[in-house]
Each structure stands twice: as C-alpha cells, then as structure tokens.
Image (cartoon, rainbow, N blue to C red):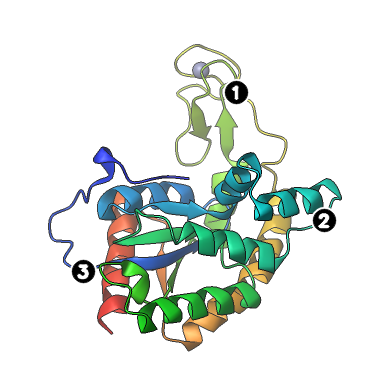
Amino acid sequence: MTEPSADTKPALAGIDFLPGPVLLLGAPGVGKGTQAQALVRLFGMPQISTGDILRKNIADKTDLGLRAKSLMDQGLFVDDETVNGMVAARLNQPGIERGFILDGYPRTLVQAGFIDALLDLHREAGTGGSALHLPLVAISIRVDEDELLRRITGRRICPTCKRSYNIYAHPPASEGICDFDGTVLEQRADDTGETFRERMVEYTAKTAYVIEHYRNKGCFAEVEGARSVNEVTRSISEALKRLRSS
Ligand SMILES: [Zn+2]
C-alpha cells in the first residue's frame, strides 16, 4: 500500500480542488500503474490496492484476513463481503484526507454499491476535514487496441540488466541486442497476441458493469492514454477537476 509521506506532498502548484476518491481503470498495458504513481505524487494521496490490503490483512491475521486466507487456501475467490470489509477498515485509517486512488476495487456492482453507500454515510455524518464526503469517480485510461497489442507483443527484455525495449516504439540500436551489455533480448512467454486478447476480453467483461454504473451517475470520464506520461497525467487531473466541479 502506498502511504503518503514527505515526498508525496502535492507536487504541482495550481491544484485547487480536492481529488477525493478516485477509481482508476485501464486495460493491461495502458500504463495505469505509472499513472497511479504520478497521481499519488501530484495530489499527495495514497493508492489503495485490494491486493495490498488483502496481503496486509492476512499478514496481520485480522478476522477478515483469516477468512480470506481460508477461502484462498481452498482455491476459492475472496467474496465481496470480505473485500468490502477490508476496504471499509482501510478507509477508517488516516492519510486519506485529500482523497485516494482505488486500484482493483470496486470490481463488481455489489462492491460499487457498497463503496457508494459507505461514502454516502460519511457525507451524511459530515465527516469533517476528509475527502470521504465526496462521491467516488471513475476515470478510465483508454488506448487503442492495436496500439496496446504493439506495446505488449513488441516488448523485449534484457535478461542481464533488465532494461526494457519495444521493437516498434523504442528498438535497440542493433536488432535483438541490448544496447548496454550486448545480451540477446528476450520476449516474455505471456507477451503474445493470444494472451493479450484473452486478457482484453477478461478486462472488458470485468469492468463493463462498473463503468456503466459510474457513467450513469455522471461520475465517469475517459482519457486518451496513447501520449506521454505527463500529458496523460494532466488529462486525468483535468478530467477529475471537471467531475468535481459538476
Ligand atoms: Zn542489458
């Protein structure tokens, strides 16, 4: 879990609004992780990932963590109720006064309904000095599917220095060879078109209802992700500001 610390103070002057709770969405390969880190720095708010919360609850042996572990040990999915409980507990901890970025949650309509109702309760209770009185907004980073395919199938990694290349966008000086140490570059086994298409189908199926839910509430925006990291961050920030002022 990324906690705000001295180096995650708001980095940009001119941020004159509270970002509040944000769900960041994006298909595999759109650069969602990079954008989440940039937003953490820009707004001085933490990223709350369900994977991190789950691991922490299991490590701390909380009741919810023990329940999740028992399900996972049986090869079962962790149910909505358990995940909801962990998220609710996390939102009672400090550090989210300006807002937070949710990663991997809500993933179902049940989870979306839960977090919306939880934030409504905070609003009605007038939880002072906290971004919890704002509704959750969802921002999706969109990249054309052909471009994503090139990003993923074009990826080559140097096994020696771990540098990453892309044969389309950022090729090495001599084909198939690392610029820095001359090692033969490798392609990861799952960086194939077939795996990519499977993941896209899974991603679309998983997020469609949640996107529709927030779109219907007027709490959804989509930004173009096939640009530089800074340009995408700026677009997300602008979209967020629009959503917060509407
Ligand atoms: Zn290398």
Disc 2 target residue: 76
Foreground of the two, 157 or 55 = 55
Q: How many marks?
A: 3
Three-letter code, disc 3: Phe
Can you name the residue that lies furthest to the left here? 13
- In the picture shown, does residue 109 fall above or below 167? below
Residue occupying the point 49% across, 57% down: 90
Crowding at label 2, few (<14), some or many (≥20) Cα neighbours within 10 Å? few
| Foreground: disc 2 or disc 1 | 2
Res. 163 visible in picture: yes
Is the distance from the Cβ of mark 1 to the nearest ligand 1 atom less than 8 Å? Answer: yes
Foreground of the two, 197 or 208 = 208
Q: Is residue 177 left or right of residue 190?
A: left
Q: x%, y% of residue 43? A: 27, 55
Crowding at label 3, few (<14), some or many (≥20) Cα neighbours within 10 Å? few
Foreground of the two, 113 or 108 = 113
Disc 1 target residue: 185
Q: x%, y% of residue 5? A: 30, 41
| Foreground: disc 3 or disc 1 | 3
